[in-house]
Amino acid sequence: MDFENARFNMVEQQIRPWDVLDPKVLDLLFHVKREQFVAVDKRSLAFVDTELPLPNGSKMLQPKLEARLVQEVALTAQDKVLEIGTGSAYLTALLASLARHVYSVEIDAEQQEKAAEHLKSAGIKNVSLVTGNGVLGLPEQAPFNVIVVGGSLALVPDALKQQLAVGGRLIIVVGDLPVMTCKLIKRETENSFSEIGLFETCIARLEHCEAAEPERFVF
């Protein structure tokens, strides 16, 4: 398979049409090799416009969504980032390539081992992998300039908002099927936040996210 041609087509046919136009992000997609973050027998699917299943049953986000998340949080080289849900670590690698340091929390230790191998093979070193329930954040390393949640939740956890630095950005997909909204939340002051809805999408639920689920009526 011609990976470079597939990568070019992914950027031109999937990612640009999804309003990912930041040259820094587009250039990054050619340098961080997505096929290195999937199983060898799935590499021909690495550039397909769909969520890819991971060995533990979770999902790798669509390429266009990963690129859009990176663009919307507007990373700088000074940013300290918290990622919730390491998964394959491809999104982790994109974030780490633009930020000072990424702390990535993954609840599945076996999946985390695979993610560590992927990052090592890609030469990404400014990442700390943490095993745990990311819905709770990582208070011992807070505050963060950017928080990226790699799976959907019913509500925005207050614990994550409180771990933002002033000026920090949280990007998260919230809601229930069939419609979810990707939201960008910014901590404007110590006690105030702004929130905008960026676009509608549907992605897999974050694993073991019961703490962030609202009470539901049962009839």
Image: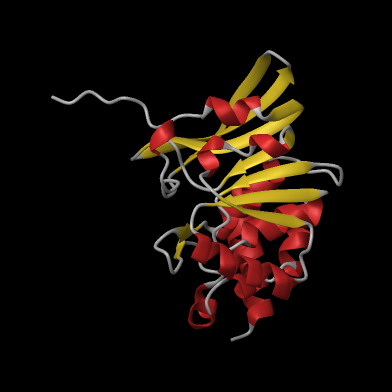
* Looking at the image, residue 208 lies above or below residue 159: below
Q: Residue furthest top?
A: 191
Q: How many marks?
A: 0
User: Quadrant of residue 153 in the image?
Assistant: top left
> Residue 120: in sight, yes or no?
yes
* Looking at the image, residue 208 lies above or below residue 216: below
* Looking at the image, residue 213 lies above or below residue 109: above
Q: Residue furthest bottom?
A: 1
Q: Residue furthest left?
A: 219
Q: How is the image coloured?
A: secondary structure
180 to the left or right of 167: left
> Residue 21: in sight, yes or no?
no
Q: Position of residue 96 (x, y in %)?
A: 75, 55
Q: Residue furthest right?
A: 78
Quadrant including the C terminus: top left
Residue for point 64% across, 25% down: 162
Q: Position of residue 56 (x, y in %)?
A: 42, 64
Q: For this rendering, which residue is in front, 28 or 217? A: 217
Residue for point 70% across, 23% down: 187
Quadrant including the N terminus: bottom right
Residue for point 48% across, 58% down: 108
Q: Position of residue 190 (x, y in %)?
A: 73, 16
Q: Position of residue 141 (x, y in %)?
A: 72, 39
Q: For this rendering, which residue is in front, 16 or 163? A: 163
Q: For this rendering, which residue is in front, 31 or 205? A: 205
